[in-house]
Each structure stands twice: as structure tokens, then as C-alpha cells.
Image (cartoon, helix red, strand yellow):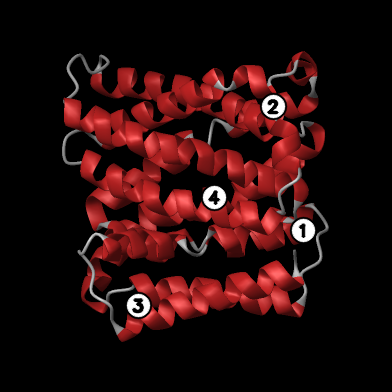
Amino acid sequence: MNLLNLSSNVSAPLLGVLAAVLFGISALPAKRGLQFVNAETGCLITMATTWLVCLLLGPLWMRSEDWFTAGFWIFALAGLIHPYLSMYASLEALKRAGTTVASTLAATAPFFSTLGAVLFLQENLTIGVGLATIAIVAGVIVLTFDGHRLARIMRVALIFASIAAVIRGSTHVIGKWGLELLPNPFMATFVAFSVGMVCMTIFIRVRYGELPRSVPTNGIKHFFYSGLFIAFAIISMYGALMIGRVVVISPIIASYPVFTLLSVWILGAERVSRRLVAGVFMVTAGVVVIAMVGG
């Protein structure tokens, strides 16, 4: 079985939805893992898990010619900001402000990616896709915004979650550019996370003077689970960007907080409210419109 042929035969919006689902679910074990280890260690475990998944699947996707392309260096450089900086900023936002607050600011990522796609990739933004993007972002904010936590948003989320949003938005643009030169989402993930892992290891060593010698089992377990979801989410994201347009894929992926909250609701930690129903309806409508009009 060739995973490259399999991924290229799936529609871009469908891969985008798959990435959003996996990103959304990955926040649950990550949030629990932060009770046992710091954000840096959690990042390193998640990156190592994603890297290991790609390595184990290597015989199904790895091609010798991909190591000698310009796209290889694009993803190597991209690894300096994603997953290194974006994942660290996201986990710090989760730790300091909580899932709902962090997701509110992270939902603005499509605005940055859409702007970059129009300016640098010359992609066309239709009225339908533009309105659907606004609906998705607004729906996520309706779902996640809590007025009682406004002070925490101003103090914490505007720093960490906004950094993550800008980086994620730019990552979609850089990823699309790189995939035009290296049409292999598995290789793109493998290279970016290899660089990210090295950067995070150096960061931990410089900041703390040494690498963690004893990591709680619960921390490893939760971030390993999160890393499994992240691995296939990133691969799906790059697969969607490889065959689709940024202005279409980015807002679909930005709907991931919906799946986080739905997962929490299924587990019994979230009650069905009018806000939940309204937010899910807005996001779902936006994704459907983009899939039909833009896909």
C-alpha cells in the first residue's frame, strides 16, 4: 500500500475536517498531561511521538528523491516555528488560561492564513468562502468565549494563543508553498518535527540546564496519546494543503475547538446549551459552505 496515492485520492475538504477532528481531540489528553509535566516537556513528548509515527510508516511513504528537493529545506526551516514555537505557545495558553480561552484567540488563525494566501500565493477569495470563514471564526468564538475571563484573555491568551494563531496561519501558507516543491505530506511532517524536536531539546537544555531525568508516567502517557492524534492531524493537514487551496483548508481546520468541546460534552463535562448549539451550527454551516463552494 502506498500512503501517498491513498492521500491524494481523498478530497481536500475531507482531509481538512479529519485534521480538525484530530486536532480537537488532541487537546484533551494534552490538558491532562499538563497537570504532571511542564509545557516544554509535553511538547518534546508530543513531537517525539509524531516523529516516531512517521518513521514507523516510512516504508509506505519515504522516497529517496524527496531528500534532495527545495521543499525539504522549506520544511526544515518551517520546523523552527512549527511545531517548535506554535506548539509551545499553544500548551502555555492551555496551561495558563484553559482550553476555552486559548481556543478563542487561536480561532483567528484563518484570517492570517487567508491574507498570506491572497498576497503571496495569489489565491482567489470568493465571497462565499470569505463569509463562510467569518462564520467559522465567529462560531468558535461563540462556543469558547467567556466574558468572565476577559481579564485572563487580555493578560495571557493575547500573548500565547495569538502567537500560536499567527504561526499556524503562516504555517498553512508556508506549507502550501513547500508542498508544491515537495508533494509528500508525510515527508513534510517528518522533516518539520525532526527540526522541532531538536530545537525544543536545545531550548529545555538552555533554560533548565539539563534535560528532565525523571518524567511522571502519567505525563508521558497523556502526551503520547496527544502526539498520536497530532501526528495524523498534521499529516492530514499537509495532505489537504497539497491538493487544496489555503483559503479553503485553513478555515476548516480552524473549526477544531468544536470537536474539543463536543468531546468534552460526550465525556459528560459540558452541558448542552444554546451557545453550544449556536456555535456548532455556525461552524458546521461554514464548513459545509466552504466544502461545497471552495472544494
Q: Which residue is drawn at 59% across and 63% down?
A: 251
Image quarter in which the C terminus is found: bottom right
Q: In this view, does 76 lie above or below 213?
A: below
Residue type pointed to by label 3: Leu
Which quarter of the picture shows residue 35?
A: top left
Q: Where is residue 106 in the image (x, y as percent from the top left)?
A: 44, 59
Name the residue beneath numbered marker 4. Answer: 19
Dot 2 falls on a residue whose secondary structure is: loop
Q: Where in the figure is residue 133, as x and y percent of width and height?
A: 61, 72
Q: Could you tell me which secondary element the residue under label 3 belongs to?
A: helix
Where is 171 relative to 65, above or below?
Answer: below
Residue 119, which numbered label? 1
Q: Which tag is nearer the camera, tag 4 or tag 1?
A: 4
- The amino acid type of the residue labelled 4 equals Ala
Label 1: which secondary element? helix
Q: Name the residue under label 3.
A: 276
Give amino acid for label 1.
Leu
